[in-house]
């Protein structure tokens, strides 16, 4: 069976280094808010090019905390609107509604699967305060036009960078394009921890301070609480593991890029719609390699039968989820079509040449 993603193999590449770190933290007797976290935050902000990086408990918390901080700073209020792509993973949307803000869904472009920037302005109202862009599947969505639009309407640009760590746009890393960015280090992400983990990057000093307090019970001084905060921390074990793996992220993303290139040049089946490689290759880190087919269920069964594991990102669009039943009637035909047709092929930094070849051959015979 060719696994969709072999996490064990990915992490065992760094077995010696990671095990040494785990033992070191275990023996140190210090498990939260220590040197490993400080170290990782410093290395992450250096890597991204941002002034600040804040380790938090997971990617959803990262996004929740950014929006919550903008509320505490008076930039937005519950009831305000945040624009978000309609085909994103549910967490981007949960972060908005969890803060009492209103998600405003905008359809994606079928070529990139990212938000269609030309459809944003018509959704802007006096209540709109931010655009939450999502670099979906690992591909950057950003442009001068988007920046101008945000400037014109005084909107914050928040990046959901859960899937695109290491991607680059015009020499800038994703996570350093907007006003603040949320990262997820869920084990299956391109930079994955051994459990839940996340981070926020920003160049905004006030936002940094507010988020640090909010994530620590609303306190920036022990036993003094200025906000009704939460507890969202990145522990020392996860920080240490991530610090080891961060060193290899560029190398691993390049392996993903090479596999994507092979798939795009060698899968030659008219029944399959392939994703496009962006002109600037660095804009994509191929978190997932998503193809489309009108016969998706049949194709997935065929691949399983031939020993190739696939996943669907994602089977149900957010507006068709029980959790958001108030959106059931929203007309979002592009998202619905995408959700019916997408299928993600195996792609990872540890795929073997024979596995890549087999995926190509089996798909060409479909
Ligand atoms: C994974 C993911 C999240 C949430 O991250 P967690 O660490 O799982 O909470 C948010 N947005 C997107 C686009 C994701 O892929």
Image (spheres, rainbow, N blue to C red):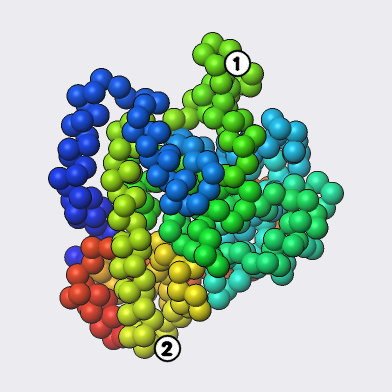
Image point 42% across, 46% down: which residue? 44
Is residue 271 shown to the viewer in this render?
A: yes
Q: Is residue 197 left or right of residue 108?
A: left
The residue that mark 1 highlights is 225
Identify the image quadrant of the N terminus.
bottom left
Neighbour tally class for label 2: few under 14, some 14-19, many 20 plus, Cα within 10 Å: few
Task: Specify the quadrant of the image occupied by residue 75.
Answer: top right
In terms of sequence position, does the residue under pointer 1 or pointer 2 come before the other? 1
The residue that mark 2 highlights is 270
Image point 45% across, 37% down: which residue? 55
- Residue lying at the far right of the rendered structure: 126
Q: Is residue 324 above or below residue 278?
A: above
Q: Is residue 143 left or right of residue 261?
A: right
Task: Specify the quadrant of the image occupied by residue 88.
Answer: bottom right
Spatial CA distance of label 1 from label 2 is 61 Å
Residue 355, position as x, y percentages in the image: 21, 72
**Helix, strand or loop at mark 1:** strand
Mark 2 Cβ inside 8 Å of ligand 1: no
Q: Is residue 102 above or below residue 268?
A: above
**Helix, strand or loop at mark 2:** loop
Image point 61% across, 71% down: which residue? 109
Residue 6, position as x, y percentages in the image: 24, 57
Residue 103, position as x, y percentages in the image: 68, 48
Identify the image quadrant of the C terminus.
bottom left
Residue 295, position as x, y percentages in the image: 43, 77
Viewer-nearest residue: 91 or 72: 72
- Residue lying at the far top of the rendered structure: 223
């Amino acid at each position: 069976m060719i696994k969709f993603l072999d996490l064990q193999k990915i992490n065992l590449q760094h077995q010696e280094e990671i095990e040494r770190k785990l033992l070191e933290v275990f023996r140190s007797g210090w498990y939260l808010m220590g040197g490993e976290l400080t170290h990782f935050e410093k290395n992450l902000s250096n890597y991204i090019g941002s002034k600040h990086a804040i380790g938090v408990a997971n990617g959803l918390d990262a996004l929740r905390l950014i929006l919550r901080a903008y509320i505490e700073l008076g930039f937005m209020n519950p009831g305000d609107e945040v624009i978000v792509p309609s085909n994103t993973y549910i967490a981007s949307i949960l972060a908005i509604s969890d803060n009492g803000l209103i998600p405003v869904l905008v359809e994606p472009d079928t070529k990139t699967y990212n938000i269609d920037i030309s459809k944003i302005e018509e959704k802007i109202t006096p209540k709109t305060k931010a655009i939450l862009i999502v670099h979906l599947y690992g591909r950057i969505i950003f442009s001068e036009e988007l920046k101008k639009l945000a400037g014109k309407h005084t909107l914050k640009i928040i990046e959901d960078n859960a899937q695109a760590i290491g991607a680059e746009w015009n020499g800038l890393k994703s996570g350093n394009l907007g006003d603040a960015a949320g990262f997820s280090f869920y084990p299956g992400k391109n930079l994955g921890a051994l459990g839940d983990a996340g981070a926020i990057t920003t160049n905004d000093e006030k936002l940094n301070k507010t988020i640090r307090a909010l994530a620590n019970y609303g306190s920036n001084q022990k036993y003094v609480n200025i906000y009704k905060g939460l507890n969202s921390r990145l522990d020392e074990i996860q920080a240490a593991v991530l610090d080891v793996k961060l060193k290899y992220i560029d190398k691993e993303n390049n392996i993903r890029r090479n596999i994507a290139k092979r798939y795009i040049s060698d899968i030659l089946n008219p029944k399959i719609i392939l994703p496009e490689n962006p002109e600037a290759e660095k804009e994509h880190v191929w978190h997932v390699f998503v193809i489309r087919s009108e016969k998706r269920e049949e194709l997935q069964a065929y691949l399983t039968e031939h020993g190739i594991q696939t996943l669907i990102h994602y089977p149900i669009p957010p507006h068709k989820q029980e959790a958001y039943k108030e959106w059931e009637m929203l007309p979002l035909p592009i998202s619905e079509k995408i959700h019916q047709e997408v299928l993600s092929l195996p792609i990872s930094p540890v795929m073997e040449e024979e596995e890549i070849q087999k995926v190509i051959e089996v798909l060409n015979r479909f």
